[in-house]
Image (tube, grey):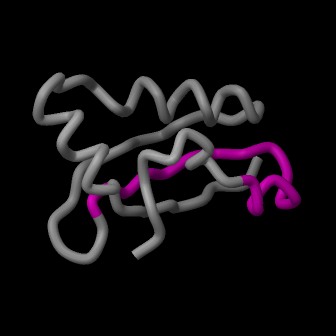
Amino acid sequence: MSTYLFQGCYTSVSVAAMVQKPEDRSMVVRGLVEGLGGKLEGFWLAFGEHDFVGIAQLPTPKRRGIRLGGGGGWRRP
């Protein structure tokens, strides 16, 4: 498996929803990564240009282009 770093930003709608109902978002990301046959090594909130950073192992390089943001809760900076 190859190891990848990913980062992104939450939409304003997502931030508002998380303020109203806080939850561990790493569990959602873990489910997405595992659904691709991978393993989530870590997921952290961040300050600055990106709201979160993660490290995951994925089985093949061709899976790099799959968007994990299918739910629409995050955006590219």
- Residue 55 sits inside the magenta stretch: yes
Which residue occupies the extreme left position in the image? 19
- Vertically, is 62 above or below 22? below
Percent x, y of residue 40: 53, 37
Q: Nearer the viewer, residue 1 or 5?
A: 5
- Residue 29 sits inside the magenta stretch: no
Find residue 26 and report its image quarter.
Answer: top left
Find residue 19 and report its image quarter.
Answer: top left
Residue at screen point 46% across, 27% down: 28
Q: Is residue 74 left or right of residue 47?
A: right
> How many numbered markers are drawn?
0
Percent x, y of residue 52: 32, 55
Q: Is residue 27 left or right of residue 38?
A: left
Residue at screen point 34% across, 32% down: 25
Percent x, y of residue 67: 67, 54
Q: Nearer the viewer, residue 70 or 25?
A: 70
Percent x, y of residue 33: 62, 36
Q: Quadrant of the C terminus?
A: bottom left
Residue at screen point 61% across, 32% down: 32
- Vertically, is 35 above or below 68? above
Magenta stretch, residue numbers: 51-66
Residue at screen point 62% across, 44% down: 70
Which residue occupies the extreme front position in the image? 13
- Vertically, is 56 above or below 2? above
